[in-house]
Amino acid sequence: MSDPHCVRLLVRNNKYSGIIVNGSGSIVIGNTCIGNNTGNSLSDAGIYIGTKTLRVRTNHVTASGYAGNRGGQRLHQQHHHQNSVSGNGANNYSIPAGQVFGPLITNTGFWIITNSNPWANFSF
């Protein structure tokens, strides 16, 4: 993608969330978050979404305390597609009910992709 307004980040080793989004209408695309939420807080994540009406797409989050991608509980209109999340404490994804979330493909141990949906999210 060559969007001049799109910045891709490598975010590593933060005590709290790696990326925090609190602006309505935001788009979080193509970031890599490694080893964030080292305090293992239940309210932080590799990517924490604290707003509504946004898209979270094609990010990779690994080894981030309690959760990889986490959304606030009273939010709506979040769209989560084509992300890969691995090795994140108790939850790779902690997304409130009612959000638009692409199919979740989990590792079966044989690295077989079980869904051909182009909007799928991966958890391994």
Image: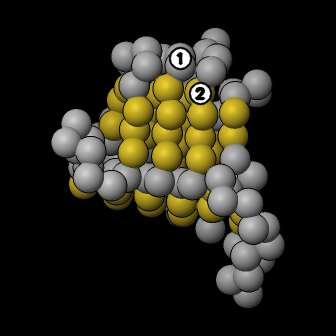
Which residue is located at x 60 percent, y 34 percent? 79
Whether residue 75 is situated above or below residue 17 in the rendered picture: above
User: Which residue is tagged 2?
Assistant: 78
Which residue is located at x 43 percent, y 15 percent? 24
Nearer to me, 25 or 109: 25
Query: Which kind of residue does numbered mark 1 sit on?
Result: Lys
Whether residue 68 is situated above or below residue 108 in the rendered picture: above
Counting from the top left corner in percent of width and height, residue 17 is at: 36, 36
Counting from the top left corner in percent of width and height, residue 14 is at: 26, 44
Asked whether, in this view, residue 43 is left or right of residue 77, the answer is: left
Disc nearer the start of the sequence (1/2): 1
Query: Which kind of residue does numbered mark 2 sit on?
Result: Gln
Do the CB atoms of the residues marked 1 and 2 lie less than 8 Å apart? yes
Counting from the top left corner in percent of width and height, residue 4 is at: 19, 42
User: Which residue is tagged 1?
Assistant: 52
Counting from the top left corner in percent of width and height, residue 12 is at: 26, 53
Label for residue 100? none
Secondary structure under tag 1 reads loop
Which residue is located at x 61 percent, y 16 percent? 75
Looking at this view, name the residue that lies furthest to the left: 4
Instruction: Give me the C-alpha separation between circle 1 and circle 2.
Output: 6 Å
User: Is residue 67 among the parts visible in the rendering?
Assistant: no
